Amino acid sequence: MAAMTRTRFDVVPLTQHIGAEIRGLDLREKPDEETTRAIYQAWLDHLVIVFPGQKLSPEDLIRVTGYFGELGEEDHQTLMMKLIFALSRPPKYFPKGYSSLLPGIMLISNIRENGEPIGALPDGEIMFHHDMIHAEIPSKATLLYSVEIPSTGGNTLFASSYAAYETLDPAIRDQLEGRKAMHHYNYGSTQRGDSRDAQTFAECSHPVFRTHEDTGRKAVYVNRLMTTGVLDMPQAESEPLLNAVFDHSEKRDFVYEHVWRVGDLLLWDNRCSSHARTDFPTNERRLMLRTTVKGTVRPY
């Protein structure tokens, strides 16, 4: 077990509204409580933090996830994937070194063996969304660690939901304030209206604008991929309002686009940011390790 160390690090903002790079930390070393608190505060301040140049084992990734809360429970998609792997894939089909990943780690990958992807969300662009917004208590945070990346594309875009709320047209905000929206997700879908696995889905309603329980700030909490409508509002009325919110929330002024490098670890706050993925060559390998931090409250 690594000794606890106090490490000075630099926080370098990446855009005006969202994103910061944490420099000077080797996450294989276990920081002391003061350092951990400072990292946590940097995350609250910047919504997305990047730890570049890491060389993490699965055990390291699980430990680092714990700095931000309880390791997230496996969702339905993770459990289904593990069942499939257990029934049909001997360890030789996993990338070298990942034949026995720890519980709580999900592969995000387009790598295929015998024509089948070894991980979730294998290909292409993904619309803006909040992770697990379709659950009663959504994930608090997500961590993603890059192991293999394509030569181009596969970038992750992060949008500040704080900035979107604070600059939203008051005429739109007033019509949606205090209302709830329904969120529906077909597992594995990357585009709105994608009907794959239509029998395997989850849905839940949450406030259109949620309050962040750590900061007290309000944020837009609807997204283009998963939000289907506003409760107790006719579709003809809610659809243009939601589309206006989606368009506003995805403005480049509010977005940080991360171009991945091998060894990058990213942590983002699902309570006040949404994210998307750009397309990338299907013939090039992409392998990421994903963990989540369990949510503690139902959005309010």
Image (cartoon, helix red, strand yellow):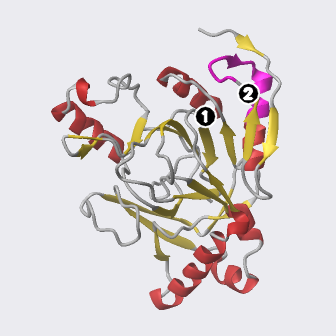
Residue 145 versus residue 72: which sits nearer the camera?
145
In space, the residues marked 1 and 2 are separated at their CA atoms by 12 Å
Residue 299 seen from this side: no
For label 2, the residue is 36
Query: Which residue is at the far front?
Result: 151
**Residue 124 relative to residue 266: left or right:** left
Dot 2: few (<14), some (14–19), or many (≥20) neighbours within 10 Å? some
Position of residue 107 measured from the top left corner of the image (x, y, whole percent): 40, 38
Say above or below: 178 vs 12.
below
Query: Which residue is at the far bottom?
Result: 236
Position of residue 12 measured from the top left corner of the image (x, y, whole percent): 80, 42
Dot 2: element = helix
Residue 254 seen from this side: yes
234 is within the stretch colored magenta: no
For the N terminus, the quadrant is top right
Q: Residue at x 24, y 25 (%)?
A: 92
Q: Residue at x 61, y 41 (%)?
A: 266
Say above or below: 48 vs 126.
above
- Residue 108 position by quadrant: top left
Residue 190 versus residue 93: which sits nearer the camera?
93
For discs 1 and 2, the disc positioned in front in the rendered view:
2
Position of residue 55 measured from the top left corner of the image (x, y, whole percent): 57, 24
For label 1, the residue is 69
Three-letter amino acid code at disc 1? Gly
**Residue 6 relative to residue 229: left or right:** right
Tell me which segment is drawn in magenta.
26-39
36 is within the stretch colored magenta: yes
**Residue 215 relative to residue 185: left or right:** right
Position of residue 262 measured from the top left corner of the image (x, y, whole percent): 55, 35
